[in-house]
Amino acid sequence: MIDISKLSPERPVLIAGPTASGKTALALEIAARQGGRIINADALQVYDGWRVLTARPSPEEEASAPHALFGHVPFDADYSTGQWLRDVIPLLEGGPRPIIVGGTGLYFAALTEGLAEIPATPPAIRAEADAMEPAKMLADLDREDPEIAGRIDRQNPMRIQRAWEVLRATGKPLSAWQAETPAPALPLDQCEPLLLDADRDWLAERIARRFDLMLKGGALEEARALEPVWEQAGGAKKAIGGPELIAHLRGQLSLSDAREAAIIGSRQYAKRQRTWFRARMRQWRAIALP
């Protein structure tokens, strides 16, 4: 996989990879052999309530090395890339050597490329955008933010809506916000950046096997405990398998159908991750798996 002895024990380590690719095991091995604090860079492992379902480190694994930013966000809260960056920066300043591990590419991009601090979109403007056709938003962007309009993926409604919301909410084009992006907190050339590049079929098998282990390890019991407050969930609702297990507990899906839907969702998510990593992380050291 990788010769850990060749990693600098002083430089921060970044470990990115798709779901179920073995990131946690590698982080734990590096921490055991070279020391360091394992810091979460997964947008779902931040939430309290989902330990088993989001494959957070077990209590035993957490006891084996210092850990940070796991399960620290309330189940009913939302959490942004900007909030994660603000939380992680103090952990880079003194203390154990950071070993930052996760599957959320935007977190790593914010850390190593910088992040424009754009105010949150007010709910009223979000509702207005949700009801608007992408073509109308594009027309507004063509007129008021031609730089973004010229380089945005015009087939991606989420990107179009994001640019339109920023313009509408702040009165300032997204291109202007991006031009003011501050210097990165942790430049890539100061790190050991490792990207786990998993074979699709190998990963698909691991995803299915891991979800079955989650079910045996208490994922359904987690869902049962959270079901009474499910409607109040914030970003934790996006945990893959969560909606399916809740639907099963409410009599809307058989456990077999919930399992199958969760595995399919995980495989689709892994595909999106792999596409994003290969497009945006070309300067990282790719580690072929298996």
Image (spheres, rainbow, N blue to C red):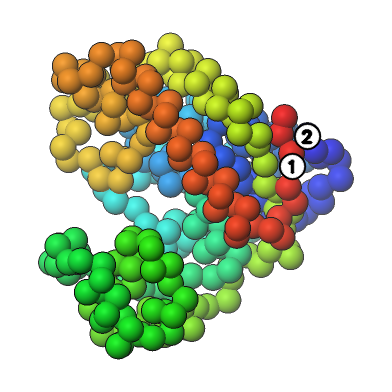
Left or right: residue 98 compared with residue 149: right
Residue 161 position, x and y percent, is 29, 67
Question: In the depicted view, which residue is nearer to us: 18 or 102?
Answer: 18
144 above or below 58?
below
User: CB under 8 Å between callouts 1 and 2?
Assistant: yes
Q: Quadrant of residue 11?
A: bottom right
Residue 251 position, x and y percent, is 16, 16
Residue 37 position, x and y percent, is 62, 44
Question: In the depicted view, which residue is nearer to us: 67 or 119?
Answer: 119
N-terminal label among 1 and 2 = 2
Q: Amino acid at mark 2?
A: Met
Left or right: residue 43 compared with residue 127: right
Category of crowding for the residue at label 1, using alpha-carbon neighbours closer than 10 angstroms: few (below 14), some (14–19), many (at least 20): some
Per the image, the residue denoted by label 1 is: 287
289 above or below 261?
below
Category of crowding for the residue at label 2, using alpha-carbon neighbours closer than 10 angstroms: few (below 14), some (14–19), many (at least 20): few
Left or right: residue 110 compared with residue 284: left
- Most extreme residue toward the right is 6
Question: In the depicted view, which residue is nearer to us: 222 or 164?
Answer: 164
Left or right: residue 228 compared with residue 289: left
Question: Does dot 1 land on a helix, a strand or a loop?
Answer: strand
Is the N terminus in the top left, top right, bottom left or bottom right quadrant? top right
Does residue 109 appear in this view? yes
Q: Residue at the location (73% across, 63% down)?
A: 190
Q: Which mark is residue 1?
A: 2
Question: Does dot 2 land on a helix, a strand or a loop?
Answer: loop
Q: Residue at the location (43% across, 26% down)?
A: 263
Does residue 90 appear in this view? no
Q: Residue at the location (27% across, 80% down)?
A: 139
Q: Residue at the location (43% across, 84% down)?
A: 147
Q: Amino acid at mark 1?
A: Ile
Q: CA distance from mark 1 to mark 2?
A: 7 Å
